[in-house]
Image: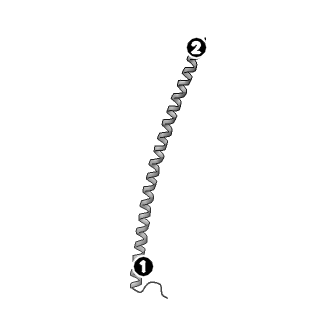
């Protein structure tokens, strides 16, 4: 009877270890996924920033051309 209890206890311990190992792998995979998403978001934000900077430069050039043609702000 004592041997059966010990075997039962050991199998529960092994099951718990396997569950924790699986949980640890799942957590690691989730962290890697979050890291990949974070890098992707950073790349997209950089692209958007470059697009906005390009648009801002384009508007400056247009404004300078309008000023040269006398269509800028009149004082």
- Of the image marks 1 and 2, the number of the one nearer the N terminus: 2
Dividing the picture into quadrants, the one containing residue 2 is: top right
Q: Nearer the viewer, residue 14 or 40?
A: 14
Where is residue 22? Give x, y as percent. 50, 32
Q: Which residue bears the numbered disc 1?
A: 63
Callout 2: SS: helix
> What residue lies at 42% left-to-right and 74% top-to-bottom?
59
Please state the horizontal and vertical placement of residue 10, each as a whole percent of the image.
55, 20
10 Å crowding of disc 1: few (<14), some (14-19), many (20+): some
Q: Estimate how packed mark 2 is, as few (under 14), some (14 to 19) or many (20 or more) residues with alpha carbons within 10 Å.
A: few
Q: Quadrant of the N terminus?
A: top right
Looking at the picture, does residue 15 appear above or below residue 39? above
Report which quarter residue 45 is drawn in: bottom left
Which quadrant of the structure image shows residue 9?
top right
Q: Tell me what residue is drawn at x 53 percent, y 30 percent.
A: 19
**Residue underneath mark 2:** 4
Q: Nearer the viewer, residue 13 or 43?
A: 13
Q: What is the basis of the colouring in this image?
A: one colour
Q: Position of residue 24 (x, y in %)?
A: 50, 36
Q: In x, y percent, where is residue 23? A: 52, 35
- Residue 23 vs 4, above or below: the answer is below
Assign a secondary structure to mark 1.
helix
Whether 55 is drawn above or below 71: the answer is above
Q: Which tag is nearer the camera, tag 1 or tag 2?
A: 2
Identity of the residue furthest to the bottom in this view:
75
Residue in view at x 46 percent, y 48 percent: 35
């Amino acid at each position: 009877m004592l041997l059966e209890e010990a075997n039962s206890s050991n199998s529960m311990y092994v099951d718990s270890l396997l569950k924790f190992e699986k949980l640890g792998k799942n957590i690691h995979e989730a962290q890697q996924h979050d890291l990949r998403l974070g890098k992707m978001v950073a790349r997209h934000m950089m692209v958007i920033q470059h697009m906005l900077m390009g648009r801002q430069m384009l508007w400056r050039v247009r404004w300078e051309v309008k000023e040269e043609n006398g269509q800028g702000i009149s004082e």
